[in-house]
Image (tube, rainbow, N blue to C red):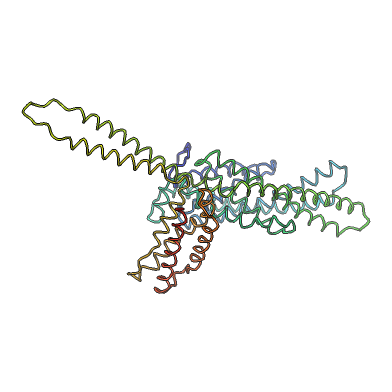
């Protein structure tokens, strides 16, 4: 892909967006390579680390567009770079904090600073070895090959390649969003160090996934990304404090209890503990505000809006057709001059055209009346498709598996969408959703299912579909 000035939008084919995104992130990564290797600019290292993180996320998002073997090679190499950069960056941040604290408070932290600088030097050597290995493995050309491979359309990836960029947002954002929500109970207990760290990682992954779709949804999505970024930074500060307090305590234990250096370190650790408490309170309040504002529902509303836009476009196109038909009717109502010998034909043709216009008007109105959150329509359509005929037992199992692969992502979004469109009695609707998820989880991933089990499963799904359909109509 040689186009350097592609402007991505919601309608851009997903495959084109894949190639352009990888090419752009590769350029950002390589731009910061010289500064990272020289060590003269720690911001170059930071920028390169961010670029590799976004690149890893993009490889996951656009993975279906690339050859699997080439994708695996690229993902492995980029992951290696990200980890190597992260170890050095973490040391840089800790050392900068210690130096700033020592300078600001007029205390001597040379013991810790010297030790941490040695650790940084070791990590830096490992980082340089990794970068040299990456260059030897020719990562830039691997990524270039990946970009160029996007144009090789196969039966496996043709459907996703030609799909609109925005249409892939929901299936990518939803799992990341659900991961974050499922880990949020960690905020109920400030002592859950591991769980809070996992929540930070979930927030980071959600943020990078959402950022990939900014060209599709613009400012509304950016506002939600800012909320995720704030939460990620709060949780990141908490994690840094946990790591640093552990390190400082380790240094304390190697010093005499009465020594001046130990007292200074105890003070530093106390300051970090207070900072952690402050950031924890901010993270807790921030998440509470997000929950109150139905952050998950808002995000899914934004990334699902593309289908509503399509529905409205279809309605607008239909309205244009109606205007044209009305003009044709008016033209037809003005009779052309005819020889007197010719009898005037009954006005059946005009009447028929007027009836056609009326039908199209009704159809257009129906299109405009579609739910503003068309995920509900999609869910109902997919659920209908699970009413599987069991006449051909050999085809039963594969068909069930295929349908559930389509449903798996969509179903995760159902509760928030039911609430967002005002479906009555959301609690009962969510209960039905829970039943359907249980059925989904019962499907063997390896397809090892008897025809009898498959028939029973199809019956269960159809029963739940009817309940859910009735619920959505109320």
Query: On the rendered image, what quadrant is the N terminus found in?
Result: top left
User: Residue visible at 48% across and 40% down?
Assistant: 8
Q: Residue furthest right?
A: 258
Count the marks.
Answer: 0
Q: Quadrant of residue 447?
A: bottom left
Q: Is residue 336 above or below residue 322?
A: above
Whether residue 464 sits left or right of residue 41 in the image: it is left
User: Residue visible at 35% across and 71% down?
Assistant: 393
Whether residue 93 sits left or right of residue 456 in the image: it is right
Whether residue 103 sits left or right of residue 373 in the image: it is right
Provide residue 432's location: percent of width, then percent of height. Answer: 50, 61
Provide residue 100's location: percent of width, then percent of height. Answer: 80, 43
Provide residue 354's location: percent of width, then percent of height. Answer: 25, 37
Provide residue 137's location: percent of width, then percent of height. Answer: 55, 53
Near-viewer residue (119 or 351)? 351
């Amino acid at each position: 892909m040689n186009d350097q000035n592609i402007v991505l939008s919601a309608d851009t084919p997903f495959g084109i967006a894949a190639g352009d995104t990888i090419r752009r992130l590769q350029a950002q990564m390589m731009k910061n390579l010289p500064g990272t290797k020289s060590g003269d600019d720690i911001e170059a290292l930071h920028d390169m680390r961010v670029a590799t993180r976004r690149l890893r996320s993009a490889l996951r998002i656009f993975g279906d567009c690339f050859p699997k073997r080439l994708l695996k090679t690229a993902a492995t190499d980029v992951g290696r770079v990200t980890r190597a950069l992260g170890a050095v960056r973490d040391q840089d941040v800790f050392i900068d904090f210690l130096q700033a604290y020592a300078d600001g408070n007029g205390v001597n932290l040379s013991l810790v600073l010297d030790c941490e600088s040695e650790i940084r030097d070791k990590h830096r050597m490992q980082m340089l070895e990794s970068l040299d290995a990456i260059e030897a493995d020719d990562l830039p050309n691997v990524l270039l090959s990946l970009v160029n491979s996007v144009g090789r359309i196969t039966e496996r990836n043709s459907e996703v390649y030609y799909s609109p960029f925005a249409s892939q947002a929901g299936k990518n954002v939803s799992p990341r969003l659900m991961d974050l929500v499922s880990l949020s109970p960690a905020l109920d207990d400030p002592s859950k160090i591991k769980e809070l760290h996992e929540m930070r990682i979930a927030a980071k992954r959600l943020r990078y996934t959402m950022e990939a779709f900014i060209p599709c949804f613009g400012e509304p999505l950016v506002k939600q990304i800012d909320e995720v970024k704030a939460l990620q930074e709060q949780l990141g500060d908490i994690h840094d404090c946990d790591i640093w307090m552990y390190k400082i305590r380790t240094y304390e234990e190697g010093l005499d209890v009465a020594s001046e250096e130990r007292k200074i370190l105890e003070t530093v650790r106390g300051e970090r503990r207070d900072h952690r408490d402050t950031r924890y309170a901010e993270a807790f309040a921030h998440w509470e505000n997000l929950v109150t504002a139905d952050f998950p529902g808002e995000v899914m509303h934004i990334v699902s809006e593309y289908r509503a836009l399509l529905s409205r476009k279809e309605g607008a196109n239909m309205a244009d057709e109606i205007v044209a038909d009305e003009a044709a009717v008016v033209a037809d109502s003005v009779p052309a001059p005819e020889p007197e010998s010719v009898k005037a034909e009954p006005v059946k043709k005009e009447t028929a055209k007027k009836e056609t216009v009326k039908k199209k008007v009704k159809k257009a109105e129906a299109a405009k009346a579609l739910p503003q959150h068309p995920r509900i329509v999609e869910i109902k359509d997919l659920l209908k498709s699970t009413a599987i005929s069991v006449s051909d037992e050999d085809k039963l199992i594969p068909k069930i598996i295929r349908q559930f692969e389509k449903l798996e992502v969509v179903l995760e979004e159902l509760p928030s969408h039911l609430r967002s469109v005002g479906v009555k009695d959301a609690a009962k609707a969510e209960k039905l959703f829970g039943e359907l998820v249980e059925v989904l989880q019962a499907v063997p991933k390896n397809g090892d299912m008897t025809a009898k089990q498959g028939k029973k499963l199809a019956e269960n799904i159809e029963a739940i579909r009817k309940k859910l359909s009735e619920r959505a109509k109320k």
